[in-house]
């Protein structure tokens, strides 16, 4: 739904007409139509991009669309930039895309098959779908795709530190290191990608991943750097209901340690939506303006997968901590008002 400000023609009985501007605020949330969740926002060149999950039942969640914009208001839809026909090992659902550019290539990471492990309630020993899969990666020459499976197998398929291999995020540090955050089931792991993104560099103790789980962590890790401070963020609560929310920590290095500071995005009584989470952050190029990109559940919410992608301003206190984010219908715009 997009409601723009507009001009009304008002004519008097004497035939004199004037233009009067409608007072209704421009409404940019949701930022595009359709049920979409887990959005990753990123800037490539002079263009803003959002890569979300197609939010539907698992048996229909078989492709990714992407959206691009020059002004954060008008969005172009790039349909089916990746789907299950391009990923031979993928048999059930893909979600939570994360993208990064490197040497004129674009690498799209994703979770697939909702991998489970014996001992979990949802594990079915007669169905090999739910115990094979993990985090995959696809590659393209363009951020709009099409993307092709890069490895022909998952990048991460095993369980380390009891973290389900889902919800990955790749962060390029100032020294050129590509850090790989991921994990569900309330555990977060950190690894370092090798130079061609085919695997990981071991840590000093020989381990592939080390656990960095902060208090309250459930899933959806994200990181950004501002004024020398590393902000590590994640989602808490349950993704299927209104308890979903975003929390964060701060550190002077990408590897932490991270101590939970608090939540910045959560639904409260009287809010315009519920269950806000699984987010990312965009910095408007050349400014200190920041945008949180997230999904939320409209009110009333009639379905588990009825989630929409939204953007709102994210602001900071003088000490670098993040102010609580207010959910709005107005959203954000890169166009001077």
Image (cartoon, rainbow, N blue to C red):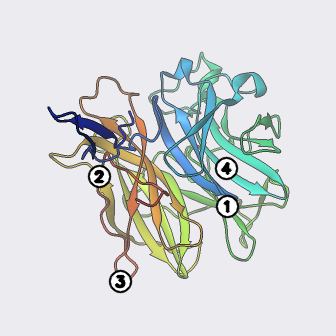
For the point 67% across and 61% down, the residue is: 191
Q: Mark 2 or mark 1, which has the lower sequence index?
A: 1
Measure the C-alpha gap from mark 1 to mark 4: 16 Å
Kindly state the secondary structure of the residue where label 3 is placed. loop
Kindly state the secondary structure of the residue where label 2 is placed. strand
Percent x, y for residue 87? Answer: 76, 28
Measure the C-alpha gap from mark 3 to mark 4: 31 Å
The answer to whether any part of residue 19 appears in the image is: yes
Q: Are marks 2 and 1 in contact (CB under 8 Å)?
A: no
Q: Single out the mark in the foreground, 2 or 1.
A: 2
| 255 lies left or right of 141 | left
Q: Quadrant of residue 31?
A: top left
User: Which residue is identified by label 1?
Assistant: 191
User: Which residue is identified by label 3?
Assistant: 318
Kindly state the secondary structure of the residue where label 4 is placed. strand
Query: In the current view of this chain or complex, which residue is farthest to the front?
Result: 14
Q: Mark 1 or mark 3, which has the lower sequence index?
A: 1
Label 3 crowd (10 A; few <14 / some 14-19 / many >=20): few
Q: Quadrant of residue 336?
A: bottom left
| 13 lies left or right of 36 | left
Label 4 crowd (10 A; few <14 / some 14-19 / many >=20): many
User: Which residue is identified by label 4?
Assistant: 99
Q: Single out the mark in the foreground, 1 or 3.
A: 3
Q: Single out the mark in the foreground, 3 or 2.
A: 3
Q: Nearer the viewer, residue 188 or 137?
A: 137
Label 1 crowd (10 A; few <14 / some 14-19 / many >=20): many
User: Which residue is identified by label 2?
Assistant: 266
For the point 39% across and 36% down, the residue is: 2
């Amino acid at each position: 739904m997009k409601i723009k400000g507009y001009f009304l023609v008002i004519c008097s009985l004497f035939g004199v007409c004037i233009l009067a501007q409608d007072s209704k605020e421009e409404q940019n949330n949701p930022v595009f139509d359709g049920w979409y969740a887990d959005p990753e926002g990123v800037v490539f060149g002079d263009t803003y991009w959002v890569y979300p999950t197609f939010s539907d039942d698992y048996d229909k969640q078989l492709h990714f669309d992407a959206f691009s914009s020059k002004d954060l208001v008008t969005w172009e839809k790039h349909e089916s930039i990746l789907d299950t026909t391009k990923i031979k090992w993928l048999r059930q659902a893909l979600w939570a895309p994360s993208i990064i550019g490197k040497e004129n290539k674009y690498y799209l990471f994703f979770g697939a098959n909702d991998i489970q492990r014996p001992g979990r309630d949802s594990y079915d020993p007669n169905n090999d779908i739910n115990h094979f899969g993990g985090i995959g990666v696809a590659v393209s020459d363009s951020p709009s795709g099409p993307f092709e499976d890069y490895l022909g197998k998952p990048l991460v398929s095993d369980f380390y530190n009891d973290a389900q291999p889902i919800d990955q995020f790749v962060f390029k540090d100032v020294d050129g290191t590509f850090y790989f955050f991921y994990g569900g089931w309330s555990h977060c792991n950190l690894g370092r990608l090798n130079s061609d993104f085919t695997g990981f560099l071991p840590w000093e103790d020989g381990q592939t991943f080390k656990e960095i789980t902060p208090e309250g962590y459930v899933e959806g890790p994200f990181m950004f750097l501002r004024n020398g401070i590393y902000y590590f963020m994640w989602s808490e609560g349950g993704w299927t209901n209104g308890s979903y929310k975003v929390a964060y920590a701060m550190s002077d290095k990408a590897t932490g340690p991270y101590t939970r500071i608090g939540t910045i995005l959560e639904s409260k009584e009287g809010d315009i939506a519920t269950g806000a989470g699984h987010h990312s952050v965009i910095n408007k190029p050349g400014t200190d303006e920041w945008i949180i990109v997230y999904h939320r559940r409209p009110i009333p919410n009639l379905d588990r997968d009825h989630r929409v992608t939204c953007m709102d301003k994210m602001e900071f206190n003088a000490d670098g901590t993040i102010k609580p984010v207010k959910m709005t219908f107005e959203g954000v715009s890169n166009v001077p008002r």
